[in-house]
C-alpha cells in the first residue's frame, strides 16, 4: 500500500522544507488538498522544481470544469474530485492523463461511483474532510468490502485517521493507497511514522469484529448440506481457497481448504465415487474470538508453526461470526 503524505498537514515549516523532508524519507506520493482554491497550482509548480514524486491532488469544488485547463497545464499523477459538492458532471478533456478518482465521505454510499465507473479509483474519506487528526470511522471497513465486490477492477484509496494499526488493517483489506497527514507529522520523525504505517503495529484500538468479513459474506457450508458438490461450489464462489463448515446453530465445526480437498482425493483415488466428505473437515483449525485486538491476532499467528492465510472468527460460545483473511496483505507486501 502506498503512503500519500498530506503536505499541508505540517503547519510549522515552509513548503520547500516539508517536501524535501518527505523526499528524503522516500514517501510514495505527495497529497495536495485543494478546497476550491486555484492558487494551489502555484504550489504544484513549486513542487515540480523540487522533486519528481507523484502528486495526488484532491479537489473540493462545485464546478470541476474550471480546473481542467490547469490540470492540462500542470499535469499530476492522480486527481480526485469530491462527490458531495458537485453541481456539474466531471468531464475530463483527453489531455488530462492523470489517474482519476471520486472522493466520498463516510455517509455516502459507494454505489455513486457507478456514474464514474470509467474512473480509476475511489477515495473514501474516513473522517470529516479538512479536519486534521480525526478518528477513523469503522463503518468505512464495510464500505471498502462493498466497493471491492461492486467494482473489483478499481483501486481504493483512503484518507483520514490512518495510524499504524489502521494502516495494517487497510493493507490487509487490499487498499492501494492511504493518505497520512497529522499522524505523519506529529510523530517524533517522519521516518518513524512511515515505519509504523508500513511495517509495525504499535497498539490496538480496534477489535476483529470491526473489520472482519461477516459470516453473511463468508464462504459457508452447513453440516446438514455437506456434499462434495456443495464444498467445491462454495470454495469456488468464495474465491478464498476455503470454506467454513457450520452446525445448524452457527456453531463452528471446522473448515475445508483446497489442500484438504486435494488430500481427500489422493486418499480415494481408487474409488472417487465413495469419498467421505467428513474426512475433509479440519476440526482443529485455529480461530480467534471476535473481541480480540489486532495485536492478539498477530500474536496468535506468530505462535503457529505454519503460514496462516485465514482465520475463522467466533463469539464466546464458538459460534462463527466471520473470517479474517490475509490474501491482500500478502499480495501487497511482495
Image (cartoon, rainbow, N blue to C red):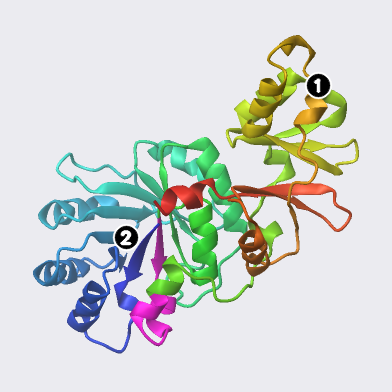
- In the rendered image, residue 267, in percent from the top left (x then y), is placed at 71, 22
Residue at 87% across, 44% down? 251
Q: Residue 16: image x %, image y %?
A: 17, 80
Return the mark for residue 128.
none
Which of 160 and 153 lies nearest the eye of the viewer? 153
Residue 73: say if magenta: no
Q: How crowded is mark 2: few (under 14 residues within 10 Å), some or many (20 or more)?
A: many
Q: Mark 2 points at which residue?
A: 59
Q: Name the foreground residue: 307 vs 81.
A: 307
Task: State the image quarter where residue 301 is shown.
Answer: bottom right
In space, the residues marked 1 and 2 are separated at their CA atoms by 59 Å
Of tags 1 and 2, which is closer to the observer?
A: 1
Res. 105 visible in picture = no
Task: Please identify the quarter of the rendering in which residue 48 is found.
Answer: bottom left
Residue at image point 68% right, 48% down: 323
- Residue 124 seen in this snapshot: yes
In which quadrant is the N terminus drawn?
bottom left
Residues packed near mark 1 inside 10 Å, few (<14), some (14 to 19) or many (20 plus):
few
Residue 246, placed above or below residue 34: above
Position of 145 with respect to 323 (left or right) is left
Q: Is residue 181 magenta?
A: yes
Foreground residue, 325 or 151?
325
Say whether residue 221 is left or right of residue 139.
right
Q: Which of pointers 1 and 2 lies earlier in the amino acid sequence?
A: 2
Badge 2 element: strand
Q: Mark 1 points at which residue?
A: 276
In the image, which residues are magenta? 177-193
Vertically, is 54 above or below 133? above
> Residue 224, how many percent across, how many down?
88, 27
Q: In this view, does 159 lie above or below 263?
A: below
Amino acid at each position: 500500500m502506498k503512503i500519500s503524505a498530506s503536505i499541508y498537514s505540517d503547519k510549522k515549516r515552509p513548503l520547500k522544507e516539508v517536501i524535501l523532508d518527505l523526499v528524503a524519507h522516500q514517501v510514495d506520493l505527495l497529497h495536495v488538498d485543494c478546497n476550491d482554491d486555484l492558487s494551489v497550482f502555484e504550489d504544484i509548480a513549486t513542487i515540480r522544481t523540487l522533486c519528481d514524486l507523484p502528486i495526488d491532488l484532491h479537489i473540493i469544488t462545485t464546478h470541476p470544469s474550471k480546473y481542467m485547463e490547469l490540470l492540462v497545464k500542470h499535469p499530476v499523477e492522480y486527481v480526485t474530485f469530491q462527490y458531495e459538492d458537485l453541481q456539474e458532471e466531471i468531464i475530463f478533456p483527453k489531455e488530462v492523463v492523470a489517474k482519476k478518482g471520486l472522493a466520498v465521505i463516510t455517509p455516502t454510499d459507494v454505489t455513486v461511483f457507478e456514474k464514474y465507473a470509467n474512473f480509476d479509483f475511489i477515495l473514501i474519506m474516513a473522517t470529516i474532510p479538512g479536519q486534521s487528526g480525526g478518528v477513523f470511522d469503522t463503518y468505512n471497513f464495510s464500505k471498502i468490502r462493498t466497493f471491492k465486490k461492486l467494482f473489483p477492477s478499481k483501486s481504493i484509496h483512503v484518507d483520514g485517521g490512518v495510524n499504524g494499526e489502521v494502516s495494517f488493517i487497510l493493507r490487509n483489506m487490499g487498499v492501494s493507497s492511504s493518505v497520512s497527514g497529522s499522524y505523519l507529522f506529529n510523530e517524533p520523525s517522519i521516518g518513524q511514522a512511515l515505519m509504523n504505517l508500513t511495517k509495525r503495529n504499535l497498539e490496538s484500538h480496534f477489535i476483529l469484529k470491526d473489520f472482519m468479513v461477516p459470516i453473511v459474506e463468508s464462504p459457508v457450508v452447513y453440516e446438514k448440506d455437506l456434499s462434495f458438490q456443495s464444498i467445491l461450489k462454495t470454495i469456488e464462489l468464495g474465491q478464498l481457497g476455503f470454506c467454513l463448515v457450520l452446525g445448524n446453530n452457527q456453531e463452528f465445526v471446522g473448515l475445508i481448504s483446497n489442500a484438504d480437498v486435494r488430500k481427500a482425493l489422493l486418499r480415494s483415488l481408487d474409488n472417487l465415487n465413495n469419498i467421505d466428505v467428513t474426512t475433509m473437515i479440519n476440526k482443529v483449525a485455529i480461530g480467534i474470538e471476535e473481541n480480540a485486538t489486532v495485536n492478539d491476532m498477530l500474536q496468535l499467528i506468530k505462535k503457529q508453526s505454519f503460514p496462516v492465510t485465514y482465520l475463522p472468527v467466533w463469539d464466546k460460545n464458538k459460534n462463527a461470526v466471520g473470517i479474517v483473511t490475509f490474501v491482500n496483505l500478502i499480495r501487497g507486501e511482495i
